[in-house]
Amino acid sequence: MPNRRRQKVTIKDIARRCNVSTQTVSRVLNKRPDVAPETRAAVEQVIAELGYQPSALARSLVQRRSRMLGVITAGLRYIGVSQTLNGITEQCEASGYALLLKELPRFDVPDIVPIIEALIAHHVDGIIFAAPEIGTNVATVQAQLPAVCPPIVFLKSRPHAHYLTISIDNYGGARQAVEYLLALGRRRIGLISGPLDWLEARERWQGWADALTAAGLAVESAHWTMGNWSSASGAAAFAALIEQYPDMDALFASNDQMALGALHYAAAHHIRVPDELAVIGFDDLAEAAYFVPALTTVRHPLRELGMTAVRCLLEQIEAGETALPTRHVVLQTELVIRESTPRAPEVQPPARAAMAAVSAPNGATTD
């Protein structure tokens, strides 16, 4: 006997079953406040019993929304960028929104207008600019935005008077890591920074420098080198650093991959970690606990960054013509202690240092 297709439940079926109007059912579905609590409960119960699934297309037409967000990003080969996109995707699915992704071929954006216009042509309700701030790329985008533009959120960028920005406390996380090394008694703390045209790298450099300065230690050019975020660059940078700073007893690497390169070089050259050299990274990759030795690192909430971006953007969309106050949201980090630093039960991770506006190596400031 052939299977009969189950007849689709409609709003009229719900209304008939509850003895209410279809408009009342619609108000319940759209979470309108002008419905009596007992009526709302009865309608929701029937919706659950009948397994009603509202049409996304119909809802978007009624609400005059596409229920689609545009995401502009670059550098998906980098772990931080890809993990942030994972959070964006997860929160969009939970919120009933689709994504239209535009990956830029490079980080600098000479002309953002055609990209924004393409997203507008697809009727996106809002835009997330998720490319890292490198050089002046974000400022260039902000200066070029057309007058008619959907709500937009900028990630990992400095505060702006007119746009919502969401970032991670790179400065505080780096400073906490170095202060922990100082609390362990390490006084000669080197740094492998990321490329300093990246805002994140400059903020982590500044956290390292300020922690040393606050402890009365000199910050010298011979005490740090720069990598490009890769493990290979970390090994090369560490080789150069140990040559110019041979009595270094601790290392802060601006990401876990460069820390891995440093650990590899140390093992190959019989530098004992953590006895001779304590090492801290930044990221808390899933693999960090399996490095040899397991890596002490700064955990930052990249997935939560993406999810927060979607939630904040939807708040702006829901507000409609009502202007929301401009905000700069900063997500906090956490120091995760493992075997690449000495075990000293009496030493606890220091309290988070306050953010400071101080000069970075290229003259930029943290905000």
Image: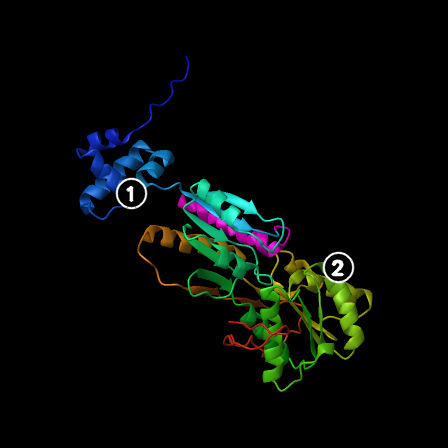
Q: What residue does disc 2 label?
A: 232
Categorize mark 2 by other alpha carbons within 10 Å: few (<14), some (14-19), many (20+).
some
Q: CA distance from mark 2 to mark 1?
A: 53 Å
Q: What residue does disc 1 label?
A: 30
Judged from this view, the residue extending furthest toward the right is 269
Front-lying residue, 77 or 111: 111
- Secondary structure of the residue carrying tag 1 is loop
Name the residue: 36% across, 23% down.
6
Locate residue 201, reporting x and y percent. 62, 66
Q: Main secondary structure of the magenta part?
A: helix
Mark toward the start of the polypeptide (2 vs 1) = 1
- Residue 42 is inside the magenta segment: no
Kind of residue sitting beneath label 1? Asn
Front-lying residue, 243 or 360: 360
Kind of residue sitting beneath label 2? Ala
The span shown in magenta is 76-96
Name the residue: 41% across, 17% down.
3
Judged from this view, the residue extending furthest toward the bottom is 216
